[in-house]
Amino acid sequence: MKRNILAGLTALALLASVPADAEPVRAGDITVEQAWARATVSSAKTGAVYLTVRNSGTQADRIASITAPVAGHAMGHETRRDGDVMKMQEAPLTVPPNGALEMMPGGTHIMLMDLAGALKPGQGFPLTVTFEKAGTVQVPVTVGKPGAMGPE
Ligand SMILES: [Cu+2]
C-alpha cells in the first residue's frame, strides 16, 4: 500500500515537471490560455510572457498582480512606437467584458523583472495571476525559442 502511494507521488512529481500543454485555466468568468515566454540569454535580467485572457462576464476584470518563481517581480507592459524606437512602459492589464486581452510580441505583455536565470526553450514554470474579480489562478508557461512570435 505504502509502495503504491509512493509510486503515485512519483508519477505526480514527473507530471508536474513536464511543461503543461496549453490547457486553458479557468476562474469564474475568466479563462487564461496559451501562456508562453521567449527564451532568454543567461545575462538577461528581463523576459516576457504572453497569454490570452478571455472574459465571458458582463463586467471588466483586471490583473492585479503577477508572480513567478523565475523572476523577482512581474508587471504589465505595453510596447509603443516612439518615432523609430520601440519603447515599453508599464500598463494596466484590463480584460473587457465579453472580450479578450490578447498579449503578443510588439504589444501588451507581462514583463518578468530580475530573472533568476536564463529561460530555456522547452522549460516550463508556473505564473500566478491574481484578477481583481475572478481571483487567483496558476497558469503553466512554456518557454519557446529566442525571438519566437507565438506559442509553439
Ligand atoms: Cu516589457
Image (cartoon, rainbow, N blue to C red):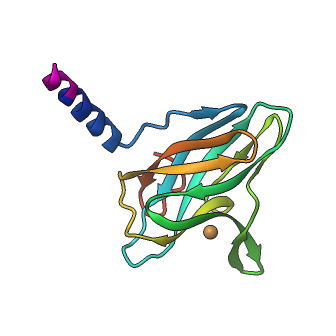
Q: Residue furthest right?
A: 58
Residue positioned most to the top: 1
- The one nearer the camera, 31 or 147, is 31
Residue 138: say if magenta.
no
| Looking at the image, residue 150 lies above or below residue 113 | above
Q: Looking at this view, is 71 or 109 the one in front? A: 71
- In reply to whether residue 2 is colored magenta, the answer given is yes
Image point (64%, 44%), residue name: 52
Q: Is residue 13 above or below residue 85?
A: above
**Foreground residue, 76 or 134?**
134
The image quadrant that residue 7 belongs to is top left
Judge left or right: residue 116 versus residue 25: left
Q: Which residues are magenta?
A: 1-5
Ligand 1: image quarter: bottom right
Residue at x-position 54% and y-position 47%: 35
Dominant SS in magenta: helix
